[in-house]
Image (cartoon, grey):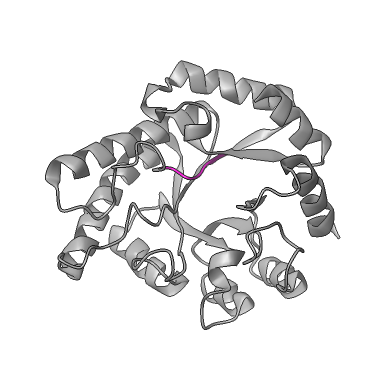
Amino acid sequence: FDATCEHIASSGYDGVEIAPFTLNEDPREIGESDATKIGAIAESAGLEVVGLHWLLVKPAWLHLTTDDPILQKDTVNFGKHLVRICAAMNGKVMVWGIPKQRTILPEWNRSDAIERSVETLSKICETALEYDVIIAMEPLAEAETNFLNTAEETIELINKIDSPACRLHLYVKAMSDEQKSIPQIITESSGYIAHFHANDPNLRGPGTGEVEYGPIVESLRSVDYQGYVSVEVFDYSPDPETIAKESITFLKE
């Protein structure tokens, strides 16, 4: 982690976003004192811990819309735990994506499943509000999940939760799957956006595919977006260091 932070900072970034399972195979074992040390390492490299993402990768059985009350309770408790370690790192945002851990199963009543997600997130947001952390809900493409596929649908959920700690996360790969243009989505969602991921539908970094970033940048400026633009990739070729350098060079241009 030390070396990673040093490279991120030397490449010109201001912050680092962390997937909890990369710190520990079981993120439940990450204590607040451990998290404080992680935050200090980032700070010593000149970085801010932006927050957390890929929240429910491990333990893999946790689920947002589950109809199992015990599993729902475990998900709430884990979400609150992540809020506390995020805050201990001085992080401010938790990106809630994780397609498989929110998909609504065919045998479930969809309305009931949505209400369970509201209940789960509302309880986590109570702790998030206490610790000044934002739960940023992430729309994902239909090929990945059947729940929260558009920014509009996600905003409906956010309004049901009705907490200042629950806002919207947008990222280019998912928005490319919507019928609306990316600038239109940004403009229509302007009052809700808390965080933003830059990448391309080809799973690589910004500027590596067909997406035009000029209109995206102008849209973010037009709505006075003040948060981070965070590079998130899924294809790590040729290597993470090259991706980091090329991505920030492209975004700054």
Q: What range is drawn magenta here?
A: 51-55
- Residue 54 is covered by the magenta coloring: yes
Residue 180 screen position, x and y as percent: 54, 82
Please give left or right for residue 41 compared with residue 140 in the image: right
The answer to which image quadrant residue 76 occupies is top left
Question: Where is residue 181, by image quadrant?
Answer: bottom right
Is 6 located above or below residue 53 in the figure?
above
Is 32 drawn above or below residue 226 in the view shown? above
Q: Give the percent coordinates (x, y) of residue 106.
A: 20, 68
Task: From the top left corner, tell me how far across and down residue 249 is, in percent.
Answer: 84, 53
Query: Is residue 172 toward the left or the right of residue 65 in the image?
Result: right
Q: Nearer the viewer, residue 146 or 49?
A: 146
Magenta highlight: main SS: loop
The one nearer the camera, 245 or 130, is: 245
Whether residue 190 can be seen here: no
Total marks shown come to 0
Q: Quadrant of residue 85?
A: top left
Residue drawn 63% across the image and 76% down it: 183
Q: Is residue 91 visible?
A: yes
Percent of width and height locating residue 144? 43, 64
Q: Residue furthest bottom?
A: 179
